Amino acid sequence: MLRLLFLGDVIGEPGRKAVIEMVPRLKQAWGIDFVVVNGENAAAGRGITGKITIDLLRAGVAVITSGDHIWDQKEVVSYIETEPRLLRPINYPPGTPGRGSIVLETAKGKVGVINVQGRTFMQPSLENPFRLVDEEVRRLRAETHVIFVDMHAETTSEKIAIGRFLDGKVSAVAGTHTHIQTADEQIFPGGTAFICDAGMCGPTESVLGREIQPIIQRFISSMPVNFPVAKGEVKLHGILVDIDPSTGKAKSIRRVAEPYVVEPDASAEADRAVPDVAAVGSDRVSLHRSQIVRDL
Ligand SMILES: [Fe+2]
Ligand SMILES: [Fe+2]
């Protein structure tokens, strides 16, 4: 079994600090083989830099996906050409810097990752995600059946539609962009794990990761306001998916909502259970670490 952790939009310094510290711990505690994070808000809430990309990769992240904020830090336009593990949505026009997919070799076989962006209520409006992702999945399946798709989109309908469209063709489809984790994790009949939105990695006392009052003020005044990244308690939101590497089909999906603990004591760390939400899969049981390790 190949265990994949996907974490949603990393928000600014609090989010990336939590991800950088927690990913190595979670990999060890949960037996994770492959980590993907969405980094589109990692630089002060806007885009990502080369340095942050390197910091995330060094922490054990295999691939960084993104979305509509990918170009917010101007340096990324040239940097993305040098780092194939940093993806931008695949449905940009031909000639756009960077790539929207990658296949990486792991100890348990090749893993493909595709980043695609929706069009409903999204700017800029990109090329048809269904057509583009279909082409890319066909191309990647020549190399591997283990494929993860980050669908960066606003509406639940567009995300579910692309999940259903890809059912049986990829291992998992997770939505990002809304920063709020949805409770609809499931495995479709063809074996594709799905969640409408993985949620964010950022401050919980916030509005989508930003300070609360400026956002309220913006809604009240309709005037331009700065939206600083919030402070305080941070949670990592995402999904943990077990995939059969021989078929590419998902066996279980669990939601992750893990508080960032600065310095856990050793005993607490040893007891860290995998997410206590029952796994959606063929064996619907509440799994704890000891059971998970046996399953591997
Ligand atoms: Fe985002
Ligand atoms: Fe976004």
Image: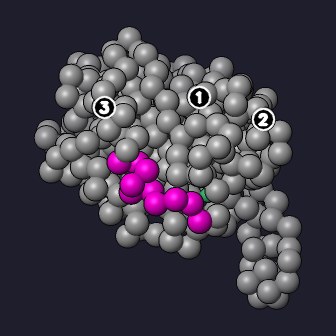
Q: Magenta segment, principal secondary structure? A: helix
Q: Quadrant of the C terminus?
A: top left
Given contact means CB atoms under 8 Å apart, are the residues at marks 1 and 3 in contact?
Answer: no
Foreground mark, 1 or 3, reads 3
User: Callout 3, which amino acid?
Assistant: Arg
Residue that badge 3 annotates: 141
Real-space CA distance between mark 1 and mark 3, rounded to the nearest whole angstrom = 19 Å
Establish if 116 lies above or below 141.
below
Q: Residue at x 81, y 46 (%)?
A: 73
Q: Which mark is residue 173?
A: none
Q: How far across and how far down the image is residue 275, in percent?
A: 38, 40
Q: Residue at x 74, y 79 (%)?
A: 216
Q: Which residues are magenta?
A: 125-134
Establish if 228 lies above or below 50.
below
Q: Which mark is residue 85?
A: 1
Q: Quadrant of the N terminus?
A: top left
User: Callout 1, which amino acid?
Assistant: Arg
Real-space CA distance between mark 2 and mark 1, rounded to the nearest whole angstrom = 14 Å
Residue at disc 2, secondary structure: helix
Residue at disc 1, secondary structure: loop
Sequence-earlier tag: 2 or 1: 2
Q: How far across and how far down the image is residue 196, in percent?
A: 40, 59
The residue lying toward the viewer, choosing from 179 and 292, is 179
Sequence-earlier tag: 2 or 3: 2
Q: How far across and how far down the image is residue 162, in percent?
A: 35, 58
Residue at disc 3, secondary structure: helix
Sequence-earlier tag: 1 or 3: 1
Q: Is residue 221 magenta?
A: no
